[in-house]
Image (cartoon, rainbow, N blue to C red):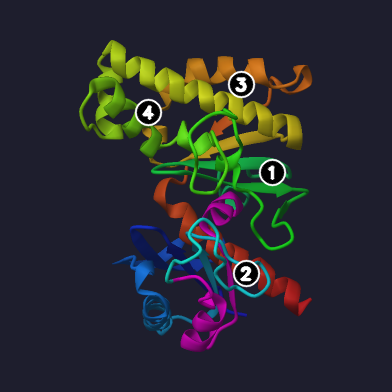
Amino acid sequence: MSDYLLGIDIGATNTRIAIVDHTGSIIASERMPSQMSAGAPFFQEVGAKARSLGEAYQVQAVGAGSAGQLHHKTGVYLPGLYPTAPWVDVPLKEILETQTGLPSFVDNDYKIHAYAEMKVGAAQGLTDFISLTLGTGLGGGIIANGQLVHGAKGIAGHVGHISIEPDGPLCPCGNRGCLELYASGTAVAKMGSAAYGEEISSPEVFRKAASGDATACTVIEKMAAALGRGLGAMANIFDPQAFVLGGSILEWYPLLEETLLSSFRSSAMNELRDVPILQSPLEGRGGVIGAALYALDELRKQRS
């Protein structure tokens, strides 16, 4: 059996394709713009680029993590939050297998990030934890007993849609007051724009908070408090060994930490208030690494 896998990370903005070895080391990689709105032709192009990158290596399988909801067994995109989106019903797993000629394994990108944390990241040695990615949105993956939690269709793990404000704003998912509406880059930008009376980006809000601007600090405290309440709710349900936080917002974690921990401890049950909140060391590498190692493990299960 060769040592190499193809890992694919299909994000909302960019897609990364990499050759990864069995230890999680990236041997070679390429990037391309994501165009999920183009439907099946885009995913066929991803498969073709993966085949091209893998030609110089004896690749044994393909793993892919993608934005959107995928049926765990069929690898077909589900309606999810956008039932009329061009990628709905696109058979990603089948396309990758056809384009590359290799066994392919696909899942939601946030779940794949959780898998990377377990294999080579902050959660090595843990069997029960929750991974959250804080960026433009808020996504997550749940590992229980050393395995990804999928649910009946593969939708489990959308922790950003826990309601923390029952009378809060309507979310595209149909719920109200979802955690993602308060604890994400989009949420910070929206709250900041309302507070300043003009459009402002989330990085600008964080930079202002870092310089001590009172208005920005209030926005960030609201975001951190919401995230703490959300983690408390998750802890009460899942009893995790740890939380692992990743994503672009982690650059600003020192601004969040005090309020986040206080809010979490006031929301979690007594026995769960000491659950560690860890920071991911993987940065942007978790998607392709997690996808590749997930494919390797699933292939081994099939062959055993």
Label 4 crowd bin: few (<14), some (14–19), many (20+), radius 10 Å: some
As measured in the structure, the alpha-carbon distance from the residue carrying label 3 to the one carrying label 4 is: 18 Å
SS for callout 3? helix
Q: Quadrant of the N terminus?
A: bottom right
Whether the residues at callouts 1 and 4 have beta carbons within 8 Å, the answer is no
Q: Which residue is the site of mark 1?
A: 125
Label 2 crowd bin: few (<14), some (14–19), many (20+), radius 10 Å: many
Q: Which residue is the site of mark 4?
A: 252
**Horizontal placement of 194 versus 18: left or right?**
left
Q: Which residue is the site of mark 3?
A: 264
Label 2 is placed on what type of residue?
Leu
Magenta stretch in the rendered image = 87-116
| Residue 69 to residue 89: above or below | above
Of mark 4 and mark 2, the one earlier in the sequence is: 4
Q: Which residue is the site of mark 2?
A: 296
Q: Nearer the viewer, mark 4 or mark 2?
A: 4
As measured in the structure, the alpha-carbon distance from the residue carrying label 1 to the one carrying label 2 is: 18 Å
Q: Is residue 96 magenta?
A: yes
Q: Residue at x 71, y 72 (%)?
A: 300
Q: Nearer the viewer, mark 3 or mark 1?
A: 3
